[in-house]
Image (cartoon, rainbow, N blue to C red):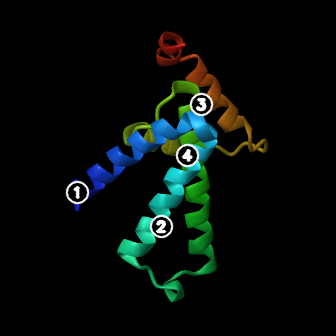
Amino acid sequence: MAMGSMVSVQLGLAIAVGLIGRIGVEGAAWIRLAWGGLLFLVIVRPRAAAFTRSSFAACVLLGVVTATITMLFMAALNRPVKSSEQAKILAAMRGVRDKDLLAPWQDLFWALLNSNEFLLNH
């Protein structure tokens, strides 16, 4: 299962990088996440009755947050976010209680634009 997961991630990255020029960063990120969700449904086959309204809302929120982080990384650094980076970002954003919902995302994008990786790539 671990090998299948690694192959899936690497294959998805290879396809996404080729698609960025055609459909943009947002399109490539959403296609990757949609395929990931579809594969999850096919492989795991969760029962609809097992989902409560709150658990379904949490799943949707996690998907939107993951998509947003992926799009910001691909737009700024021309690469997908690493799982270790995503875990740190999610942990940092979990504690944010700002009334302005866009502020944490703007701060993340600003940090990416000021990173050494961005400066060396562009």
Distance in Å between CA atoms under marks 2 and 3: 24 Å
Q: Earlier in the sequence, mark 3 or mark 4?
A: 4
- Mark 2 — residue? 38
Asked if the residue at tag 1 contacts the one at tag 4, i.e. Cβ–Cβ closer than 8 Å, the answer is no
User: For the point 40% across and 48% down, which residue is it?
Assistant: 12
Distance between mark 3 and mark 4 Cα atoms:
10 Å
Amino acid bearing label 1? Ala
Depth check, mark 4 against mark 1: the one in front is 4
Residue 47 coordinates in the image, percent (x, y): 46, 85
Identify the residue under disc 3. 75
Q: Which label's residue is closer to the chain start, 2 or 1?
A: 1
Horizontal and vertical percent for residue 59?
55, 65
| Quadrant assignment for the C terminus | top right
Mark 2 in CB contact with mark 4 (< 8 angstroms): no
Q: Earlier in the sequence, mark 2 or mark 4?
A: 4
What kind of element bears circle 2? helix
Nearer the N terminus, badge 4 or badge 1? Answer: 1
Q: Point out residue 13 in the picture as x, y percentages from the top left corner.
A: 41, 42
Horizontal side of residue 55 vs 11, given as left or right: right
Asked whether 119 or 110 is in front, the reply is 119
Question: Which quarter of the picture shows residue 42?
Answer: bottom left
Which of 81/29 is in front? 29
Judge left or right: residue 104 versus residue 92.
right
Q: Amino acid at mark 3?
A: Ala
Residue corresponding to mark 4: 29
The residue to which callout 1 is attached is 2
Choose the circle earlier in sequence order: 3 or 1: 1
